[in-house]
Image (tube, coloured by chain):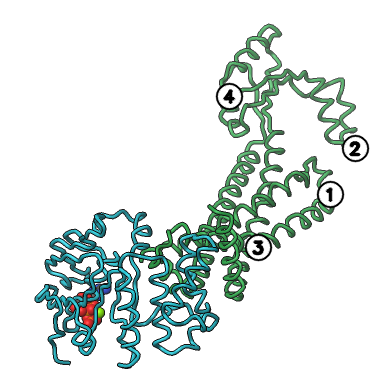
Chain colours: A cyan, B green
């Protein structure tokens, strides 16, 4: 079943940079997709369009049948709840504990306290941080912080999570720990789209690979290779 | 909205007020200074207006009649004056009454004129009141053209000057108040902008996890409103107690010139409500304009 469908998507930034030049793609429910390509190829722009941080200049992006390109401003929040996002720099709130950081995602969508407590402990267990619930982000290692941000992205059970270089700031070993969590999440049925420069991971944990260069898809293979020298 | 959510918004607002203590203090001070000036201006302006309208109300036209005029022509004259559109009422004043009034208005010095009673130098007169005091001079010049009118008197010059002064005072006061309010709004929007910058990341994450704009705005709305209200406290106290004091001091002295200040109540209560509302609006407006930019993520 198709979860995400991009049809002839173009993105030109206001400064004239043509970041995406006609992208067509289908991503099915439950897939694990790497997005690779050289720096400046348009990977971040590609994923940003998926969660409507950027609006495409042309074309349509359907997520579960809703066209993000046509989405009204006030319908964006509802749509965002269907998509978990993870960044290279974690984006945690430094003054909140691990527990509060994760609960935050549910509080702002007005979940009941009971549901919040139960779900937060559930996902903290999944990422292996149950015992650090009361710690603050600056008391955690980079890998642990990224696990908190993953916990936050999945706590409201979105059908898809989108990660932009989630292991970019981590050493290889920690990067693999993070990958294990993504694997686990994917096995539970959540679709994962991940932009990455990590050759090692792409080549070892083989999944679908979409390669972007100059804003175009130049390769799309099941169980693909990273394909670039670093 | 759920009451749990509302509680959260209030908690967030007050947390931010405390966390940005100095900034909050700066915003409150800005509103305080503005509202103080606005309050004082309003008190002065309202009183000036009140005094002016008391004086304006006293303005009347006296049209003196030629001694040769026959009694029958008096009625025609009165009717003609009454038909001028801007005229409110026309009263006849005989020369005897005129003298009486003159003597009374001059007090002790007037006694000297008592001897004139037998050979009264004053002519008969009509006293004309216009509907609006500002029409006085046009009506006067109209009447001046009539037959049998010897002279028209309405404090020429003085009246025009009075109207000019009250008119200018009203406009200047209005411009000043509007200017002050805009300055305060600008200051508050800038200070709240700074508190928002420090919460930029929080807003960004809220948006990413699907919080609605309304949800994000609420705490800032409350924060702005509270800042504005706090800024109104000192000005309200100053207006209430200051005016009470001033009124006690000044009003008795004014008695001698037949004018009065506005009574303390209900004016200070109305002004207090007004200052609180202006403060709240300035705060809300300031915070909403600065939050708007950050919501476009
Ligand atoms: N907000 C923006 N405004 C203008 N141009 C931008 C903006 N974001 C990206 N670009 C430009 O668009 C092009 C694609 O950028 P993008 O960030 O998508 O690349 P990327 O593949 O993610 O690169 P990297 O691997 O370095 O993260 C680049 O030329 C970049 O300079
Ligand atoms: Mg990028």
Q: Which residue is mark 3?
A: B230
B262 shown above or below A6:
above
Q: Residue furthest left?
A: A218
Q: Are marks 1 and 4 in contact (CB under 8 Å)?
A: no
Residue located 22% across and 58% down the image: A62
Disc 4 with disc 2 on a shared chain: yes
Disc 2 with disc 3 on a shared chain: yes
Q: Is residue B180 visible?
A: no
Disc 2 with disc 1 on a shared chain: yes
Residue located 59% across and 52% down the image: B173
Q: Which residue is mark 2?
A: B108
For ligand 1, tell me if the residue under mark 2 lies within 8 Å.
Answer: no
What is the x, y in percent for residue A42? 19, 75
Q: Which class describes the residues within 10 Å of circle 2: few (<14), some (14-19), or many (20+)? A: few
Q: Which residue is mark 4?
A: B86
The quarter in which the C terminus of chain B is drawn is: bottom left
């Amino acid at each position: 079943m198709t979860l995400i469908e991009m049809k002839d998507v173009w993105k030109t930034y206001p400064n004239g940079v043509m970041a995406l030049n006609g992208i067509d793609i289908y991503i099915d429910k439950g897939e694990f997709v790497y997005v690779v390509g050289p720096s400046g190829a348009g990977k971040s722009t590609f994923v940003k369009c998926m969660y409507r941080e950027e609006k495409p200049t042309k074309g349509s992006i359907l997520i579960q049948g809703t066209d993000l390109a046509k989405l009204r401003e006030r319908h964006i929040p509802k749509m965002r709840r269907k998509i978990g996002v993870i960044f290279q720099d974690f984006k945690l709130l430094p003054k909140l504990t691990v527990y509060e950081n994760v609960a935050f995602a549910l509080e702002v969508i007005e979940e009941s306290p009971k549901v919040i407590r139960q779900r937060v402990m559930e996902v903290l267990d999944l990422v292996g941080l149950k015992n650090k619930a009361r710690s603050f982000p600056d008391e955690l290692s980079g890998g642990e912080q990224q696990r908190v941000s993953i916990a936050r992205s999945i706590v409201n059970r979105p059908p898809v999570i989108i990660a932009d270089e989630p292991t970019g700031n981590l050493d290889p070993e920690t990067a693999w720990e993070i990958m294990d969590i993504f694997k686990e999440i994917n096995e539970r049925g959540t679709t994962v789209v991940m932009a990455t420069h990590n050759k090692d991971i792409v080549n070892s944990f083989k999944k679908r690979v979409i390669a972007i260069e100059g804003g175009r898809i130049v390769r799309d293979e099941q169980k693909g290779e990273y394909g670039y020298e670093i | 909205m759920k009451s749990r959510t509302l509680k959260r918004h209030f908690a967030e607002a007050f947390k931010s007020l405390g966390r940005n203590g100095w900034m909050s203090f700066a915003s409150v001070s800005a509103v305080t200074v503005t509202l103080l000036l606005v309050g004082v201006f309003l008190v002065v302006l309202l009183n000036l207006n009140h005094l002016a309208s008391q004086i304006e109300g006293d303005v009347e036209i006296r049209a003196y009649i030629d001694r040769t005029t026959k009694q029958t022509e008096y009625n025609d004259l009165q009717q003609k004056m009454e038909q001028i559109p801007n005229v409110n009422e026309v009263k006849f004043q005989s020369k005897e009454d005129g003298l009486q009034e003159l003597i009374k208005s001059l007090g002790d010095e007037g006694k000297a004129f008592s001897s004139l009673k037998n050979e009264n130098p004053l002519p008969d007169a009509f006293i004309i009141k216009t509907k609006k005091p500002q029409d006085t001079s046009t009506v006067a010049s109209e009447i001046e053209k009539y037959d049998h009118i010897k002279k028209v008197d309405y404090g020429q010059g003085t009246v025009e000057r009075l109207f000019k002064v009250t008119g200018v005072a009203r406009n200047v006061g209005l411009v000043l108040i509007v200017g002050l309010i805009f300055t305060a709004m600008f200051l508050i929007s800038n200070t709240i902008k700074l508190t928002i910058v420090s919460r930029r990341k929080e807003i960004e994450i809220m948006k990413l996890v699907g919080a609605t704009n309304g949800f994000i705005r609420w705490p800032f709305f409350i924060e702005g409103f509270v800042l504005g209200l706090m800024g109104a406290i000192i000005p309200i106290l100053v207006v209430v107690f200051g005016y009470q004091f001033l009124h006690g001091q000044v009003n008795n002295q004014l008695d001698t010139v037949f004018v009065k200040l506005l009574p303390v109540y209900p004016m200070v209560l109305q002004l207090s409500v007004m200052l609180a509302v202006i403060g709240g609006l300035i705060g809300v407006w300031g915070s909403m304009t600065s939050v708007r930019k950050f919501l476009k993520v």
